[in-house]
Amino acid sequence: MMLLFYLFCIFLKCVYSQPSNGLHGGPIEAECLSFMSRERIWVPVALDEVIGPMGGPSNNPISLARHHIIPVRTLRSFFDTAVRENHEGNVELTGLMSLMGFLSDDALNQYGETDSLNRYIRSDLEQMRQLQSYYINQEFEFNNPPVDILFSADYLVRSVFQWIPANIFIGPAPQLRSDDPGDAFEVNSRYIIGEEAYQRLVTINRMMESYVQTRERATYNEVIELLAEISRGRDVPYPFDRSQWIYENNRYRINTNPHNRKRREAEDVPLIDDDPYCLKPLELIKMSMHEENLIIVSEVLDRAIKHKGFYSKNYGSWKIGTLILPGEFGIYADGISMAGQGWVYDPYGYKFNDNSFAVGILGTDARGKSDNWVNLSHDFTTTEGTRDYAGQVFFDKNGRPVAIVITSRQWADVGSGWSFIYNNEKWEYERTDSWDERRFAGRTESLDTTAPKFVMS
């Protein structure tokens, strides 16, 4: 699963209804930044229409967004520091796991088993809860906790932590605001959430920043307690209230009038209320990845991006690199190295002259997976060693998957292996090495022109 799927077309296909037609046109939207293990995914989530706030043009829908009060930058730095600074006895991680257990329990209460998507979310949250219980009951070696699992999107950990409802309010999208703070603390949120809740978040923000600088365990423990406290008191984001916003000069700003302290009736934004932890975009992507047989592809691409990234290779396009050649620069040896199993390099990928690209793949990447290629001609799910099979996954210049070419050392020595071509949301096995010209004569784009687009950063 863990995904880091930079997949805009999935959002467009599964989530986004239609583009906005200017400042007040189009459907309402909410931005969910599902960062997971890389902090760069932007996910627009289509919502129902809401009438514009008082002071703006009447009877026009506007775009709403989820706004962090403690900024994502601070949350990310705090949790990343806790993982890096985990000490003997896993003190920091134990605190993180305890909070994770509480949040996952709370989130489970928010997602009823009303449809297949919610059941999918609940399944992952239950896995996250089981991981927390497993961790607390096990003894891990000094400074060697299951960090990769803890911060894998399989268990939604980053998404749950970074979208704690008590730290989120709903308001006009950032591009419609004149007072949006960017990645700074949302000072004017006091007029939306109330002074008491605001002061708690000010304290947590200050202590998070202090912990990142000092690594003091006492500060860390207090932050964890405070996060649990505010989460117990609120399990949905602060709703949109039109009286809390002023429209002037074609932009919205928070109403900082001192009389704007009494909460009025809030607008009903059902999809935000139904998705308080902003998990549905992530799960829609995961469901699509399963349906389109792209789970493994997304994982091996993520592996390269998270480590070394991409090196330029002077090939005109991906087509030049698909031949199975013997030797230290053949597709098997390159695949071993690109997947991070060589003697020197962490995982990386190649970027070709036309902006197509490739990443390494191993037979072990297929273990426990159900993408249709894993047993088309050979059962890769039973692969035991990381060096048993290796190869590359190729993407066209648009980021769409093209082919998987994988082989063993022995088969590579005789120029043979397995090639799988992506078409119509599945992989097709090719028995001969002539497929690159036979099926791609005069073209380099993926045969599946509606496949998800992956990006390299």
Image (cartoon, rainbow, N blue to C red):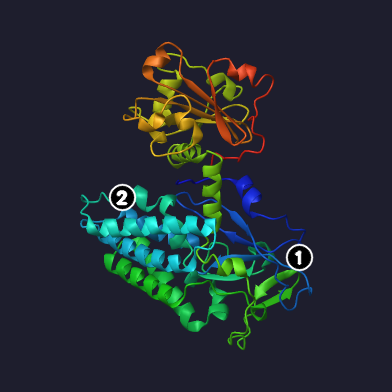
Left or right of residue 218: residue 425 = right
Q: Nearer the viewer, residue 103 or 180?
A: 103
Residue tagged 2: 146
Q: Nearer the viewer, residue 8 or 245?
A: 8
Residue 282 location, x and y as percent?
Answer: 52, 53
Tag 2: residue type?
Pro
Left or right of residue 417: residue 24 = right
Residue occupying image coordinates x 62% and y 81%:
256
Residue occupying image coordinates x 30% and y 64%:
95
Left or right of residue 299: residue 441 = right
Residue occupying image coordinates x 58% and y 74%:
239
Tag 1: residue type?
His
Q: CA distance from mark 2 to mark 1?
A: 47 Å
Residue 419 location, x and y as percent?
Answer: 51, 23
Q: Secondary structure at mark 1?
A: loop
Residue 251 location, x and y as percent?
Answer: 72, 69
Q: Is residue 327 visible?
A: no
Q: Are marks 2 and 1 in contact (CB under 8 Å)?
A: no
Residue tagged 1: 24
Left or right of residue 270: residue 161 = left
> For the image shown, how many numbered marks are present on the structure?
2
Residue occupying image coordinates x 45% and y 66%:
107
Q: Secondary structure at mark 2?
A: loop
